[in-house]
Image (cartoon, rainbow, N blue to C red):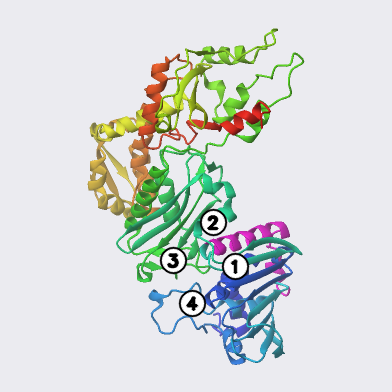
Amino acid sequence: MPIIRRLPETLINRIAAGEVVERPAAALKELVENAIDAGARRIAVTISEGGLSRIEVTDDGCGMAPEEIILALERHATSKLPDEAIEHVRTLGFRGEALPSIASVARLTIESRPTGARQGWKRTIDHGDVLEEGPAALPFGTRVRMEQLFHRIPARRKFLRTPRSEYAACLDIIRRLAMARPDIGFVLEHDGRRILNLQGGESVESRVAQIIARELADNSVQIEFQRDALHLTGLAGLPTYNRGVADHQYLFVNGRPVKDRLLTGAVRGAYADMLARDRHAVLALFLQLPPEDVDVNVHPAKTEVRFRDASGVRGFIVSGLRRALSTGDRRSAQGPDASAMERWQQEPTPSGSANVDSSPALRSMFDRDWTVHSPAVREAGSAWRAQDEQAMAVPQGRAEPAEEMPQDADEYPLGIARGQIAKTYIVAEAADGLVLVDQHAAHERLTLERLRTAGARDKVAASQPLLMPEVVELDEADCDRLEEQASRFADLGLAIERFGPGAMLVRALPPAIRSGDPHKLLQDLADDLARHGEALLLDEKIDYVLATMACHGSVRAGRTLSVAEMNALLREMERTPRSGQCNHGRPTWVKLSMGDVEKLFGRK
């Protein structure tokens, strides 16, 4: 029979370190969070070889006395919990594990000088062993240096990635923490090269735009939404300003960077009918709520949280995001694609005329693929690209006698229609430039909003009784979740009831998905409830049906419109929410300022 024995302290520390310090970025996160909790106004970070050989964090915080440094290197010793009310924690750290964990798997040097002290103090620990300690010369604050991570634990070190990959993870950590605290200045250097130099005292919007992308400031809306004790702020990118991966979604809870599935699901739900399935929003959301309503002690790295009212938080975020996006709903990421502009502005032809092969330019501006259009449209595009032997060749299109710009032209942001190109794009003249509108994408959004306004959702969600009710067998826990939400599903046209411990009876489906597989539908709903605590999946299915109906009921590319029809479309776009993008997240219109137009002709 195996003998139970107490593990040595050094091994206990290394086991604990495996949960806290899995890679250099994890150690960096703990060190920078300590600096923030110490009240630092400026934090300087130096990294070598992606953090594999050295990480140094210097701050101007409150500092530590010699006896406090010794205590800080003991497990579960912290200044951040004055009492045992861990549910009221307001600091980033609170467990007292980070420094001793790092010291057990690396060479750690702490130098600190409290405010008002005549000198500082230094203590060095090498993989759990004290090497040296004594006086140190440094300004007020703390400097922590970690070297030789996992040097004595080769089995752990071999699982680390390349310096380039580890550096990318470190950079992401600093970006997130710097976004969370725009009042603090951050400096990051890697292998002697300065990567970030952020000044303290910035606004959230300015700091976020600096870190994510400067163009985000012009392609986003500000969020300011409050309900009772919940407060949501930040920047949300317009649906047309999106990415192919979700790595530009930054989420914060009470100033703590998190990667939480519930919050990610709420973002997906808010953008459900504005983005294609393979595109992702760009945003930074800051959620504030009472500390007792969120549990931050559910993950060793403190990157996940648990909400007391998960469904309420998710609904609050979806509502706040949708309300904010509606303030910019007639906007899109309007700047023409740079490569498209380069193709548009080409060298003159030998005859002296400009090259008019701008079909590809227009297509890339609207992110369209012409291969899906009708033969008539492709023929129009080919005719446009063909160069006439005459010097003044022009693209195939149509126009009617131009009207004078009305006196109240400023009231028409999308301008007055002047013609149609390739039976697909409307050309309009606005007071401040040239507007190009994708007629099908625009009308698709208008049709969807009409369906919603007319109560189309209620019609789509009407129940379609099954000829024979179907029994769906599931895990008992999944059945419990579904039963709790049965009344809500009934409102959406899905009639279900409990049929024993491990089964649900499906009596009716929404007509829009009546041909679907009830088992797969209920399993997806149960999985969604397990992940998020509130199922939005059925809502998204119905939204998708509405979007499909809108697509089929819209003006198609390739249809000739009169000037009156074009102007009617433009005026309705100006009145309709979210008209800046189609149901798939592509822009419905782009604008060339008069300055851009003049540049095309060499006038500026």
Residue type at mark 3: give it. Answer: Asn
Residue type at mark 1: give it. Answer: Gly
In the shown orientation, is residue 52 left or right of residue 140? right
Q: What is the spatial separation of the Cα atoms under label 3 and label 2, in whole angstroms?
A: 19 Å
Camera-side residue: 499 or 65?
65
Q: Secondary structure at mark 1?
A: strand
Task: Inspect the magenta stretch and tell me whether residue 481 lies in it.
Answer: no
The residue that appears at 51% across and 69% down in the rendered structure is 300
Q: Which residue is mark 1?
A: 185
Residue type at mark 4: give it. Answer: Phe
Camera-side residue: 195 or 245?
195
List the single residue furthest toward the front.
407
Q: Which residue is mark 3?
A: 254
Q: Which residues are magenta?
A: 151-179
The disc, 4 or 1, on the residue closer to the chain's N-terminal end is: 4
Image coords of residue 415 (percent x, y): 45, 27
The residue that appears at 68% across and 62% down in the rendered structure is 159
Identify the mark at residue 226; answer none if there is no mark: none
The disc, 3 or 2, on the residue closer to the chain's N-terminal end is: 2
Instruction: Please tell me whether mark 4 or mark 3 is closer to you in this view.
Output: 3
Instruction: Please tell me whether mark 2 or mark 4 is closer to you in this view.
Output: 2
In the shown orientation, is residue 51 left or right of residue 588? right
Image coords of residue 52 (percent x, y): 72, 67
Q: Secondary structure at mark 2?
A: helix
Q: What is the spatial separation of the Cα atoms under label 2 and label 4, in whole angstroms?
A: 30 Å
The disc, 4 or 3, on the residue closer to the chain's N-terminal end is: 4
Q: Is residue 520 above or below residue 69?
A: above
Q: Quadrant of the N terminus?
A: bottom right
Q: What is the spatial separation of the Cα atoms under label 4 and label 3, in whole angstroms?
A: 14 Å
The disc, 2 or 4, on the residue closer to the chain's N-terminal end is: 4
Instruction: Please tell me whether mark 1 or mark 3 is closer to you in this view.
Output: 1
Q: Which residue is mark 4?
A: 94
